[in-house]
Image (cartoon, rainbow, N blue to C red):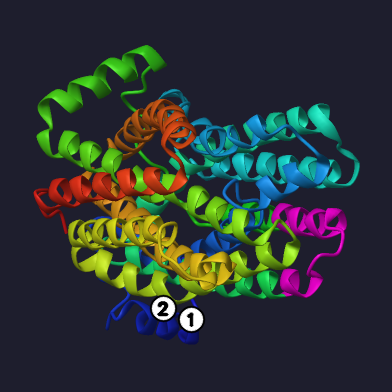
Amino acid sequence: MAEHPPSQTRLFEWMTGDDDSRMCKDIPDAACQEQPRNFFLHLFAALGNKLADELSSARLVLPWLMGIIGAPVWMVGLLVPIREAGALLPQIFVAGFIRPLPRRKWVWVAGAVLQAGGAFVLALLALFGTGTTGGALVLAALVLLSLARGVSSIATKDVMGKTIAKRRRGTLMGYSGSVAGAVTLAAGGVLMLFGDRPGNWALAVLLIIAALGWLLNALCVARIQEEAGAVDGGQNAWTSIKYGLSLLKHDRAFLHFNVSRALLLSSALALPYLALLGQQQSGTDLGNLGLLVVVSGLAALVASPVWGKLADQSSRRVMCYAATGTALGCALGASLFWLPGDWTNSAVPYALIYALLVIVHHGVRLGRKTYLVDIATQDDRALYVALSNTLTGILMLAVGGAVGALAQWLGTATLLGVLAMTAVGALASAYRLPEVE
């Protein structure tokens, strides 16, 4: 067993609030001994992944890319559904594939490398893509990114569950979100300096940095010390689906969690529409994109560690708090459309409310991720994660299409009001979830 530098162990214990890093609740002794080193590898891996996600965001960066290359407007509406559903739908199949593998980190590495490749393709399209063809190629590259993200996502949670003990996972995800937020904040500040200058090269650089972030993710994951896990009970995709559906029938807490998670989609769906309202008032130059990236990064920097600590105490309460914030943010965003005054024609008030929604969206993500990892056991965690994500992917496609139709019919502001009411339903549902910590 490798000896860890005392400074590394002390820093780990300080960051997690533990007096003894060797006390582990639900991972083997061998994994517990490696926990300080693995904690920091997870942290830097998450930094690369979160930074790459922000700099290739389907909510902010890719719509600007579509506008710059002159892609049709209807293609922009496909970005978020493809990004989210493409990452979630295949996961029930991936779960059956990785079950026979004693060490799942290499699946995570493969997904990260594929995402890096997709980001490099997007960078080239920022420089050379034009019109409908360029837009179609952006969507194709996004499909690759999303599928690879789905492969990595299920392996990420499985490896974390094997290498990081309970009551330290939320803290880990919180710190990683904070560090990534700081780097994203710097990137947004640079974008603001570009103002209304041509953005092709700036977007290409952002996307290359995103690709490097995923390569950093792959490098760190490859160095994680993962103990061999259970390989019995491997199933093909259809058997996994049937077993997963039986879980929904017999595990009422798991079913209830998925209902709450579905209602919490309102936080993800609200962000691009609030950005759209701000864009309609202030234009599409890179300075305004930089402002939104800055508030997004600042929100992550401030919020993620707080949400992470709270999630280790009660991930259920985190989902309740985040649902409340989502309802408030959507209601405020909708109200801007009807308030009098020239100040509502500036991008600034929209950016402030966007920051609030980003903060609560981080709470949604940290709360439901921590709850899902903790509600499952080591033997069935991969299946729980895969089934929940697959169900959410199906809902994202269906609800995303319905939301787009509502926005076209009722207008963006009214749609935000509808999403505020959905968030109230999420609060009521999450409040009734059982505690799992």
Which residue is at 41% across, 58% downward? Answer: 338
Residue 121 sits inside the magenta stretch: no
Q: Report x, y in % for residue 105.
A: 52, 45
Which residue is at 40% across, 25% downward? Answer: 398
Q: Give 157 or 364, whichever is nearer the viewer.
A: 364
Disc 2 crowd, CA 10 A, few/some/many (<14, 14-19, 20+): many
**Residues marked 1 and 2 touching at CB (< 8 Å):** yes
SS of the residue under disc 2: helix
The residue lying furthest to the front in this view is 340
Q: Report x, y in % for residue 313.
A: 20, 68
Q: In this view, does 252 lie above or below 24?
A: above
Q: Tell whether 239 sits left or right of 341.
A: left
User: In the rendered image, which quarter is residue 175 located in?
Assistant: bottom left
Which residue is at 54% across, 71% downward? Answer: 342
Q: Residue 60 carries which label?
A: none
Quickly name the residue at label 1: 8
Q: Which mark is residue 12?
A: 2
Residue 198 sits inside the magenta stretch: yes
Q: Report x, y in % for residue 427.
A: 18, 52
Callout 2, which amino acid? Phe
Which residues are the magenta region? 190-212
Callout 1, which amino acid? Gln
